[in-house]
Amino acid sequence: MGRLTTHVLDTAHGRPGAGIAVTLFRLDGGRHELGRCITNHDGRCDQPLLEGAAMEAGRYEIVFGAGDYFRAMGLDLPEPPFVDEVALRFGIADTTAHYHVPLLVSPWSYSTYRGS
């Protein structure tokens, strides 16, 4: 069964990004919100962002509230912060596969990849 998951790692502090708002959008034919979650103590959403019949081929975007996360930690960030909302756009072609989209983030950089 196909599914979409994510995981946030706070590379500035060497720990999972707990308490980060995550919003998933489908981009085909517009920008439609599909769901929201807050990352748990391990930096993950408790449930897949998509799975089963909801897993459709197409273009998607995940938006991570990284700036709010770092502000809540009390970091002295410029306004506006260099990294605020991180929007990752990607495609799902194989609806039977596991798409894992990790975010590695600090107040000054971020990266992603297709994980397993």
Image (cartoon, rainbow, N blue to C red):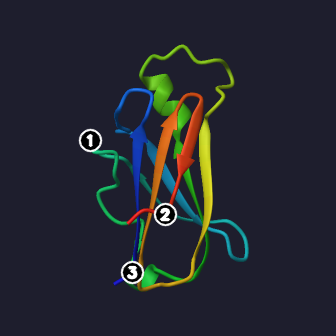
Bin the neighbour count of mark 3 within 10 Å (Cα to Cα): few under 14, some 14-19, many 20 and up.
some
Q: Residue furthest right?
A: 29
* Residue 13, horizontal then vertical, whole percent: 38, 27
Tell me: 93 left or right of 2. Answer: right
C-alpha separation, residue under disc 2 versus residue under disc 3: 14 Å
Q: Quadrant of the C terminus?
A: bottom left
Of the numbered discs 2 and 3, the one sitting upstream in the chain is: 3
Cβ–Cβ under 8 Å for marks 1 and 2: no
Q: Determine the secondary structure under disc 1.
A: loop
* Residue 34, horizontal then vertical, whole percent: 52, 67
Bin the neighbour count of mark 1 within 10 Å (Cα to Cα): few under 14, some 14-19, many 20 and up.
some
As shown in the figure, which amino acid type bears the numbered disc 2?
Arg
Q: Quadrant of the N terminus?
A: bottom left
As shown in the figure, which amino acid type bears the numbered disc 3?
Gly
Q: Which residue is mark 3?
A: 2
Question: In front of the other: label 1 or label 2?
Answer: 2
Q: Residue at x 45, y 16 (%)?
A: 74
Q: Which residue is mark 1?
A: 41
